[in-house]
Image: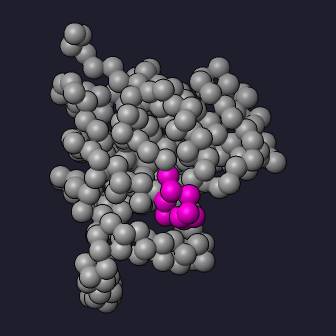
Amino acid sequence: MHNRLTPTFSIITITYNAESTLEETILSVISQTYHHIEYIVIDGASKDGTMDIVDRYRPHIAKVVSEPDKGLYDAMNKGMKQATGDYLIFLNAGDSLHCDTTLQSIVNGLKKEPLPDIIYGNTALVNRNRHFVGMRRLQPPKQLHWKSFRNGMLVCHQAFIVKRTIAEAYHCEYRFSADFDWCIRMMKKAVSMHNTHLTIIDYLNEGLTTQNHKASLKERYRIMNRHYGYASTFAYHVWFVLRAFIRR
């Protein structure tokens, strides 16, 4: 057995009319010093110049699908079906890997076989000009556990890297928070989880519309009930409200 670990990362970017943000994302992937990457772009039949950008970088992209889909999580499920790598990374248009050595640094931190089921790290927030705005308010715990997300989504979905062999489809009945549910389900299955202690992702801090934000929070409440039970979820939400008042 070789000493050097060389897991392959299937990086999946979902796009729809993303011409203004996609190029930065692609560049962050193809400029990685670590080359065991399978890059997949799943486009929802964009009507702008998204596919022109994809075509420009086509030699660096392993698989491209462009067709109508039933929304973000349906597209993510399509991407997962295309993937053949050891790990899945979902990198949305506008988000990017933190620096050119991010994947190499992650791999350097992995000790030996067997590879961990989940790898996770920190997320930096950036603006449209890629300038650093601050670190994400919710921070990953030292040791991640499936019950950790009772306190909210402590690891950004893009910085939550899952071994493909344990991955299951997203539940598309959740329109805004299927990633929250998916991460909890993956943690329940995982035997080992590895904290990289690295900033993995630069997240484009655009902010969802408040309308979507409300719908998303309602879904999260349902998801928490499903995984953590009604009493526990209610108690935690009382605490969230109190904490918000205290912070004021």
**Residue at the spot 58% in from the left edge and 72% down from the top edge:** 212
Q: Is residue 131 left or right of residue 22?
A: left
**Residue at the spot 69% in from the left edge and 35% down from the top edge:** 65
Looking at this rendering, what residue extends furthest in the top direction? 1
Q: Give the image location of residue 33, x and y in percent.
A: 42, 23
In the rendered image of this protein, does residue 196 appear above or below residue 145?
Answer: above
**Residue at the spot 65% in from the left edge and 46% down from the top edge:** 15
Q: Give the image location of residue 147, x and y in percent.
A: 24, 62
Residue 245 inside the magenta-drawn segment: no
Residue 177 inside the magenta-drawn segment: yes
In the rendered image of this protein, does residue 10 appear above or below residue 174?
Answer: above
Q: Is residue 108 left or right of residue 182?
A: left
**Residue at the spot 22% in from the left edge and 10% down from the top edge:** 1
In terms of depth relative to the viewer, which is nearer, 29 or 16? 16
Q: Give the image location of residue 173, x and y in percent.
A: 56, 63
Region rendered in magenta: 170-178
Looking at this rendering, what residue extends furthest in the right direction? 47
Please identify the quadrant where the C terminus is shown: bottom left
Q: Main secondary structure of the magenta part?
A: loop
* Viewer can see residue 204: yes
Q: Give the image location of residue 213, x and y in percent.
A: 53, 73
Q: Quadrant of residue 70?
A: bottom right
